Amino acid sequence: MKDVVKEIYAKVKLQEGPGIIEQMLIECYMNPGISTKELARRQMLPIPVAAAIKKELIRARILKQDRGVDCTSTGRRCIEQAGGYQDIDRSLYRRFMREGLELQELTQEREWHGWREIFNTRPQVNVQIDQSKCTPETSLRRAILALRNHAVIGKRILCVGDDDLVSVSLGFLLKQLFPGSSEAKAEIEVVDIDDRFLDYIRMIAERENLPITCRLVDLREPLPSDLCGQFDAFFTDPPYTLQGASLFLSRGISALRKEKGLPIFLSFAHKSPDFMLAMQREFVRMGLTVGSTLLHFNEYEGAEMIANRSQMMILKTTDHTAPEYTDSFTDALYTGEVKRTRRTYCCLQCTEIIRVGMDGEYQTIEALKNAGCPSCSNSTFKLMSKEEI
């Protein structure tokens, strides 16, 4: 299917990226007879653009127009064999794609037996590295969100840290969508610094036959080269510091394929307007756009510091996407580290030296970035030294 998508993309030159063409094909496969107007609405495209894509797909004998838009036999083979949709439970797929899905009712069904118990017996969190347990429903909501963004079936997905067991929820989601299938319908990889969670996920993956592999990785160091440029999407719920968000996003970006429109699922605490301004500057610096923000999307067990809730941001890559951090990371990372350190930064434009943290001119790096360098107003800085208080 990728070859067909590339061929059509070369002709249409969509600003949104080639993923839109793939999503249109899947919509036609799952909803035969869909109208061009509805196709455009679901992909948030102007109707003339959707019509131009449809026209090229008809010329390629992938789609046909007959009381709406449908796949040809060639198109169906392409989606099933190359796209990984063969033997999918269409009824369940449509159920997952509908808004208002009742997860409590869904997970009480017989086919989901054992899923909740996996979350009840996971390792205890380590608060020193900002771990917190999201609820089982939240983990599954994240997996379904990726499915709705066409980032699961036939994809390579990375979990940048996974104390929330999103990898397991993705695996169970695929098991339900493809009952009886022995083929892996996605590749899911987990990188984490906590061996306890990696061992637990490995055990579950082996027992439940889930397509998950795990690797011990310290994200303060660059990703191993064999993980770079390989993935179609990634999840991360980083430490709730500006440095944590920037570092985890940087490592995830390094793992993504070089293509615009790829989704990034970022969970993060609800923060002040000043903090969010600094974070959005980081997004711009890394060439990311914010596709949507879902407030109060994530629920956690016992995380009173963030009122047990956090937001989900769906970011998208562009032609300008690049990681901010590519080398080893030496700055304060976790919440406890940020609060008890005094750090010295150098302005990358005028070399002004500024102190941040305890007794510094600025309490946090986000405050410094929002204010800009006091000498030249530049907003990019390099860490020069860090002192424990």
Image (tube, grey):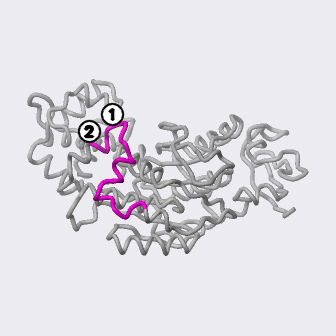
Residue 371 colored in magenta in the image:
no
Q: Secondary structure at mark 1?
A: helix
Which residue lies at the image location 42% right of the left edge and 52% below the top edge?
140
Stretch of the chain drawn in magenta: 95-116
For disc 1, the marked residue is: 43
Of residues 250 and 192, the one drawn nearer to the viewer in this rendering: 192
- Mark 2 → mark 1, Cα distance in angstroms: 7 Å
Amino acid on which the number 1 mark rests in the picture: Gln
User: Can residue 43 be seen at all in this image of the molecule?
Assistant: yes
Depicted 321 relative to depicted 34: above or below = below
Location of residue 18 in the rendering, given as x and y in whole percent from the top left corner: 33, 43
Asked whether the beta carbons under mark 2 and mark 1 sit within 8 Å of each other, the answer is: yes
Indicate the position of residue 124 as horizontal and vertical percent values. 59, 67
Q: Earlier in the sequence, mark 2 or mark 1?
A: 2
**Residue 111: in magenta span:** yes
Q: What numbered label is drawn on residue 24?
A: 2
Q: Is residue 209 left or right of residue 213?
A: left
Image quadrant containing the C terminus? bottom right
